[in-house]
Image (spheres, rainbow, N blue to C red):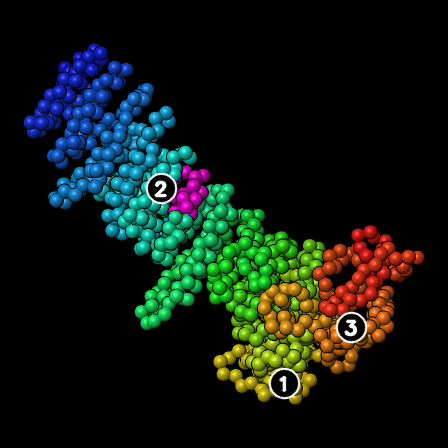
Amino acid sequence: MEKLTFYAVSAPEKLDRIGSYLAERLSRDVVRHRSGYVLIAMEALDQLLMACHSQSIKPFVESFLHMVAKLLESGEPKLQVLGTNSFVKFANIEEDTPSYHRRYDFFVSRFSAMCHSCHSDPEIRTEIRIAGIRGIQGVVRKTVNDELRATIWEPQHMDKIVPSLLFNMQKIEEVDSRIGPPPSPSAADKEENPAVLAENCFRELLGRATFGNMNNAVRPVFAHLDHHKLWDPNEFAVHCFKIIMYSIQAQYSHHVIQEILGHLDARKKDSPRVRAGIIQVLLEAVAIAAKGSIGPTVLEVFNTLLKHLRLSVEFEANDLQGGSGGSANLNTSTKDNDEKIVQNAIIQTIGFFGSNLPDYQRSEIMMFIMGKVPVFGTSTHTLDISQLGDLGTRRIQIMLLRSLLMVTSGYKAKTIVTALPGSFLDPLLSPSLMEDYELRQLVLEVMHNLMDRHDNRAKLRGIRIIPDVADLKIKREKICRQDTSFMKKNGQQLYRHIYLGCKEEDNVQKNYELLYTSLALITIELANEEVVIDLIRLAIALQDSAIINEDNLSMFHRCGIMALVAAYLNFVSQMIAVPAFCQHVSKVIEIRTMEAPYFLPEHIFREKCMLPKSLEKHDKSLCFLTNKIAESLGGSGYSVERLSVPYVPQVTDEDRLSRRKSIVDTVSIQVDILPNSIPSDDVVSNTEEITFEALKKAIDTSGMEEQEKEKRRLVIEKFQKAPFEEIAAQCESKANLLHDRLAQILELTIRPPPSPSGTLTITSGHAQYQSVPVYEMKFPDLCVY
């Protein structure tokens, strides 16, 4: 062998003839089963290959690979292992120049077949499988680094290599399910265990994948998992994709996520457990990708997930409608539970994905999800609910709001305008008026996520009378100008939804707790002196509504509102630290503790609480009085004129869209009569209610002119003499967008020009009133009608 090696190195041009001769001898010995001579010939080929690195080695390599192929084709396991070992040695040699004409198709096929060996002897079977995996590893190392010859990444090769590795990886008895990367195998395990060796080869293959061939390496994984039904249970699938996500380059993570989404679309009609398995795999992939690059297709991810959420709800609704009979009901119940698994998996994925996005992208996702929430009576949402029915629509509403709740969790905006822009606030508040207590709870929880910028919500959990608010160590900052502007623009809208939300007939304890938290968070995060006055007006109005009970609420709900008012006024009185106000609130709470404990949250929300038969006979000492509050706040420098004006929420189109019977059936317009002074007792709103009967009388043409003149005179007189704050409190209209400019206008005396600039015809219901002059003021973009 030494002489042969010296001769080959000295005369490299003879390598071709030496290789041909050894190949001929080896072929003959293989056919005649002369294993000893075969071993000698392969050892000679190996040593010559390792010793010679000249340009003339190319023809010798062809003879060498031909001999390796002969050994792999033989049926003897020892010769197959021998051929594999020789090929691995060859694969580790770095050639100076690539050989473009050389192909490894046969070796890929043969090594893949060896990975699936079914030999009867377990030891021999393991030995052959290990040889096959090492052979695939050699092919990968030999070809994968050559950019000009990337044939190994072609689908026909990947469809053989990847399933062969996964087939052996399945033999791992204990799959590591931790969040971190799977542990690296030891050197001894790599050589002896086919599963560990296959996993190591799989990591190496994926680590060498580039942008152009990433998909070819990942798609066979889906085919293998489908063929072997490994999505349910999905432990192995999760393990595979953890390996994939940790092995590939971080910037390619979004390619894998797109492939998972595409496969989810392809399997959308499969069983719920299969879809749930794929979604859980997506969750694991997203959890890893979120630490690096998620990619540019964020909206595509959420769009696909929301589409499958709708499909799951649709399948669930169809199963509920189609199920009848004993066995059918049992099957329907099982499918229903399976679909809930799918829905929960989607929501978890959406929440985890959204919580790892940067703030600017998370705002877009919040708007995107909100645009999908269906609201009865509107077509602004972009989700197809034609096949869902009422039950399915309610279900999709809950699922989408739960998704939104997950996305907003942990979101911290510097200003409330950033967290709650008008384009997001309006559609968010629409479900808060729906006749479903669970929907209203979710809306309030989303609001809390966005409002609570100093993590105070946990300290406010549960509605209760707090003896000393200072013990809570509430964190707050000075209200910035942007937050003040937000409350001037949207404050009345928030108050209105809280007011109407308190008066819902199906409220449970959690609704009152969340409404209390909403009032407390507004006080902490957004309240200046003006907002505090408005919140107190709102609380007093809720107290009045519970006592008068125009909405025919049950005694539990009336007492619940009284308890909510008591808890909030106790909180706000200590927050603003006005001693006289705190004294009045404490005195009322003390009297309630002795005479009417059902007006306090600690008692009314217990399981067994004695309720009164009526509230009309209760003494005024059990109520919070406007005159007492105004007197106490006025002495501390607060502007209390507006406390004398009862809070009345305005009616908008949102009420019609939310299916609120009390507002849809009869829409009443309330015109407040402004009192000139603060009354001595609790204020009751003195309003003129215009119903359908009143409008019929208004149509009478005989007195219409006099009525219109009187109304115009009252309106002009109010705008001339009343202070701006009082007008704003009465109107509570979203039309006052340009607050500062309008304030300047209202300070002027309205002097109409010699002739009006036009007329405006006012139509209300069935009555059309005569034209009213339109006078233009100093500013061309604002007019007073």
- The Cα–Cα distance between marks 1 and 2, rounded to whole angstroms, is 70 Å
> Which residue is identified by label 3?
699
Question: Which mark sits nearer the N-terminus, 3 or 2?
Answer: 2
Residue found 50% across the figure and 52% down from its top: 355
Q: Name the residue under label 1.
A: 615
Mark 2: amino acid: Arg
> Which quarter of the image is occupied by the C terminus?
bottom right
Q: In terms of secondary structure, where does tag 1 sit?
A: loop
Residue 506 magenta:
no
> Is 29 positioned to the left or the right of 363 in the image?
left
Badge 1: residue crowd in 10 Å (few <14, some 14–19, many ≥20): some
Query: What amino acid is labelled 3 in the image?
Result: Ile
Residue sitting nearer the eye, 417 or 557 = 557
Residue that badge 2 annotates: 219
- Where is residue 608 shown, x and y percent of the image? 49, 83
Residue at 60% across, 72% down: 661
